[in-house]
Image (spheres, helix red, strand yellow):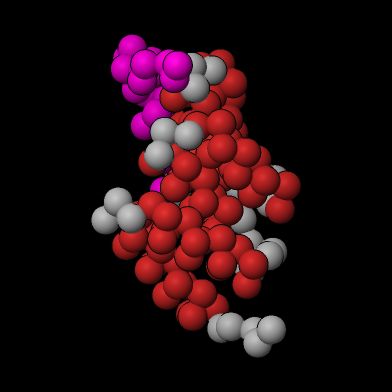
């Protein structure tokens, strides 16, 4: 396999996110899975695959991919924040808050931490998604 430059991988990821934004979930999943093969040391494409499952309301599969991402990088606030979100949608409030709290601590001033804190704040205000069936 020919190694790709980081910039090329970023462009591929952006293409996957464009597909995701367009609702073309199968294409997005294929792109992200391909990038995961090309960058096996990165948790980012696995989180992206999880996001495709989340968008499809397949929260169990999303959780599986976020946890797989955490096996690569246990201190990833990015993966922990999205894991927490999926756990909220699965109705696992306490487990979700624990993951969101970890993401917040790991990223006190970054986007992943901000996302986690916004979800924690929503839960505190009583704004929680209905539990998945």
Residue in view at x 68 percent, y 51 percent = 73
**Residue farthest to the left, as pictured:** 22
x, y percent for residue 91: 48, 17
x, y percent for residue 85: 46, 32
Q: Main secondary structure of the magenta part?
A: helix
Q: Does residue 82 lie above or below 40 as drawn?
A: above
Residue 29 appears in view: yes
Q: Where, by quadrant of the figure, is residue 74 drawn?
A: top right
On the rendered structure, is 122 left or right of 131? left
Judging depth in this view, the residue of 113 and 92 nearest the camera is 92
Residue in view at x 49 percent, y 61 percent = 30
Residue 75 appears in view: no
Q: Where, by quadrant of the figure, is residue 122 drawn?
A: top left
- Image quarter where the N terminus lies is bottom right
**Residue farthest to the bottom, as pictured:** 2
Q: Where, by quadrant of the figure, is residue 89 drawn?
A: top left
Magenta region:
111-133
């Amino acid at each position: 396999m020919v190694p790709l430059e980081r910039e090329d991988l970023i462009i591929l990821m952006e293409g996957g996110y464009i597909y995701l934004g367009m609702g073309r979930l199968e294409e997005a999943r294929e792109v992200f899975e391909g990038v995961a093969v090309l960058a096996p040391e990165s948790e980012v494409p696995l989180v992206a695959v999880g996001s495709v499952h989340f968008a499809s309301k397949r929260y169990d599969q999303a959780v599986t991919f976020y946890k797989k991402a955490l096996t690569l990088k246990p201190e990833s606030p990015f993966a922990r924040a999205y894991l927490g979100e999926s756990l909220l949608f699965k109705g696992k409030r306490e487990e979700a808050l624990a993951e969101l709290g970890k993401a917040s601590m790991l990223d006190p001033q970054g986007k992943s931490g901000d996302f986690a804190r916004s979800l924690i704040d929503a839960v505190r205000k009583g704004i929680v998604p209905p539990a998945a069936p």
